[in-house]
């Protein structure tokens, strides 16, 4: 077989994650991997909260978790606290993991709904080890005893994404990825429309057989060269700007992200070991940049450590992620606002699927179709879940929230919400992000309680139900008491250095 040349355009999180994974998986005698990045252009420079899947990505590369934590200034993340979303003054934690314990095939939340109607239930988060440990700023690894509630939560990280990209750069270079510095000025396609070569600003020409577009919002190859249209979802997710700034840390880092709803968007707070990452995501139709700046700065709990970073974006995605001999990974393929920290996850999914469907020399149209269908599905499921956070609300205190309340929903979300409201049903996904417990967390956390629960719940008497919830609550508290403080868990790694 003739050696194939893979060219990755872009050295942000997407580019270096792709370079690390491809160089780890593909035989270096059969594939050359080159990454081009431009210091003049730089990277988007935000993106610090992750979901648990990143652990599996790191594991697949053989990365040691302690080393990763130390090198990326990471903290543990047990979930996200949503403040002022369902109504002003309300808050809840969306943890990674289950609530309670299912009874046979019936999910716990059906039992909770009945107990709630009887006035005998605490907030559903009280029955989750992940949520309670987050609230109490505790952390320990989940156990592997499948019967224990302490095995029914998961965790992710808050990371310094630029340190993570640097870490993966080192990794990829050690696996023979070649890095080229330079700004791509021209892209040449052949008669079939495939990309053939790139020309850098110093005149160097780089040929390739397969291209991975990690050029960020520019979408240099997929969007600009191959003219794959952008499908805007801004009518459902109208926030189109963000302003971000790191600030000094005050006190020990907490093991969760905080997302506080504001009058025209929301503010994030992401605790790293060394600093806090902050940002305001907002809708420019309802909030000026000046007011966004004021809102952000008034919500910091330490002094700013850098200049403000203003960003513009559109919610949506390219109509396909793979066209011709080019796959888009990262922002070049689409963007959904960071409310549930899903961009790095979508990068990981695209890379994993690319490796699953990696094209050989033969025609790859079926592989391409499958890849595109699966990516579309991932984006749409996440889109619906994000929209749910906005529409599950009583808020009507600003034009922004009044617009949200009046907007028409995607049919897929409307159906999902009806199923839940009527009988507590959550559409089951075979795989992917945000399974039943996540939807339950947001619905119940934001005040949407189903009219009915699964009829099988009535086979348990009311007394039994109340007692079993009491036992669960005690069990959760017991496990959380045994955990270390989050700060201690991190010091452990620091002292191991
Ligand atoms: P970029 O970082 O923009 O990298 C693009 C690369 O392409 C750069 O190296 C650039 O130099 C190169 N390039 C572009 N054009 C050329 C050219 N002509 N020649 C040579 N090189 C070129 N994600 C999360 O998972 N969690 C979060 O908490 C999170 N928060 C976010 C908050 C905001 C406000 C935004 C906007 C995004 C957030 N994201 C988050 C998304 C996350 O930042 C991105 O998914 C991630 O950084 C990957 O970006 P990227 O590598 O696709 O693009």
Image (cartoon, rainbow, N blue to C red):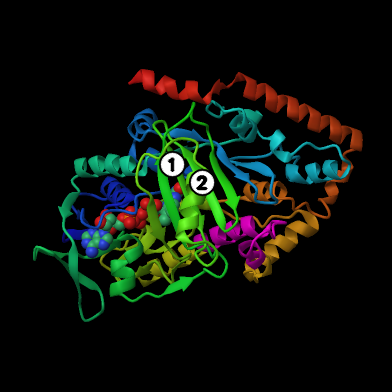
Q: Is residue 263 magenta?
A: no
Relative to 176, residue 142 above or below:
above
Provide the residue designation for mark 1: 277
* Residue 355 seen in render: no
Q: Position of residue 317 (x, y in %)?
A: 45, 67
Q: Is residue 379 magenta?
A: yes
Q: State whether label 1 is within 8 Å of ligand 1.
A: yes
Q: Give residue 357's quadrant in the image.
A: bottom left
Q: Position of residue 376 (x, y in %)?
A: 49, 65
* Residue 458 seen in render: yes
Q: Position of residue 493 (x, y in %)?
A: 40, 23
The residue lying at 59 percent from left, 52 percent from top is 262
Mark 1 residue crowding within 10 angstroms, few (<14) / some (14–19) / many (20+) = many
The residue lying at 72 percent from left, 48 percent from top is 444
**Tag 1 and tag 2, C-beta contact below 8 Å:** yes
Provide the residue designation for mark 2: 268
């Amino acid at each position: 077989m003739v050696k194939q040349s893979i060219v990755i355009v872009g050295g942000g999180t997407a580019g270096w994650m792709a370079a690390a994974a491809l160089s780890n998986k593909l035989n270096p005698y059969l594939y050359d991997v080159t990454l081009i990045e431009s210091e003049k252009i730089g990277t988007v420079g935000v993106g610090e909260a992750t979901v648990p899947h990143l652990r599996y990505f790191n594991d697949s590369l053989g990365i040691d978790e302690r080393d990763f934590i130390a090198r990326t200034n990471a903290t543990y993340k047990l979930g996200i606290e949503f403040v002022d979303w369902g109504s002003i003054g309300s808050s809840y934690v969306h943890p990674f993991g289950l609530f309670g314990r299912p009874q046979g095939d019936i999910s716990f939340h059906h039992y909770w709904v009945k107990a709630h109607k009887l006035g005998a239930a605490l907030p559903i988060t009280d029955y989750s080890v992940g949520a309670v440990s987050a609230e109490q700023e505790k952390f320990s690894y989940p156990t592997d005893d499948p019967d224990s509630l302490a095995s029914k939560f998961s965790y992710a990280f808050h990371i310094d994404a630029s340190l993570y990209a640097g870490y993966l750069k080192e990794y990829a270079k050690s696996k023979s990825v070649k890095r080229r510095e330079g700004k791509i000025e021209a892209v040449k396609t052949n008669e079939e429309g495939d990309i053939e070569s790139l020309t850098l600003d110093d005149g160097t020409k780089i040929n390739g057989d397969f291209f991975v577009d990690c050029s960020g919002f520019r979408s240099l190859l997929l969007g600009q060269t191959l003219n794959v249209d952008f499908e805007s979802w801004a009518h459902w997710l109208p926030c189109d700007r963000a302003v971000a700034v790191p600030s000094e840390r005050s006190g020990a880092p907490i093991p969760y992200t905080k997302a506080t709803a504001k009058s025209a968007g929301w503010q994030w707070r992401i605790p790293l070991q060394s600093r806090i990452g902050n940002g305001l995501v907002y809708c420019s139709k309802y909030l000026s940049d000046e007011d966004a700046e004021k809102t952000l700065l008034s919500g910091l709990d330490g002094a700013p450590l850098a200049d403000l970073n203003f960003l513009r974006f559109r919610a949506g995605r390219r109509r396909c992620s793979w066209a011709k001999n080019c796959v888009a990974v990262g922002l070049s393929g689409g963007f959904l606002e960071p409310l549930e920290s899903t961009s790095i996850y979508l990068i990981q999914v695209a890379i994993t699927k690319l490796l699953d469907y990696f094209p050989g020399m033969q025609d790859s149209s079926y592989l391409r179709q499958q890849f595109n269908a699966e990516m579309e599905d991932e984006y749409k499921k996440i889109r619906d879940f994000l929209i749910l956070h906005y529409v599950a609300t009583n808020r009507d205190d600003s034009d922004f929230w009044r617009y949200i309340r009046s907007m028409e929903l995607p049919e897929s979300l409307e159906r999902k919400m009806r199923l839940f409201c009527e009988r507590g049903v959550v559409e089951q996904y075979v795989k992917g992000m945000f399974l039943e417990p996540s939807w339950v967390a947001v619905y119940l956390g934001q005040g949407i309680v189903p009219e009915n629960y699964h009829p099988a719940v009535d086979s348990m008497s009311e007394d039994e139900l109340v007692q079993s919830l009491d036992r669960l609550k005690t069990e959760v508290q017991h496990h959380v008491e045994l955990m270390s403080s989050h700060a201690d868990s991190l010091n452990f790694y620091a002292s191991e250095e």
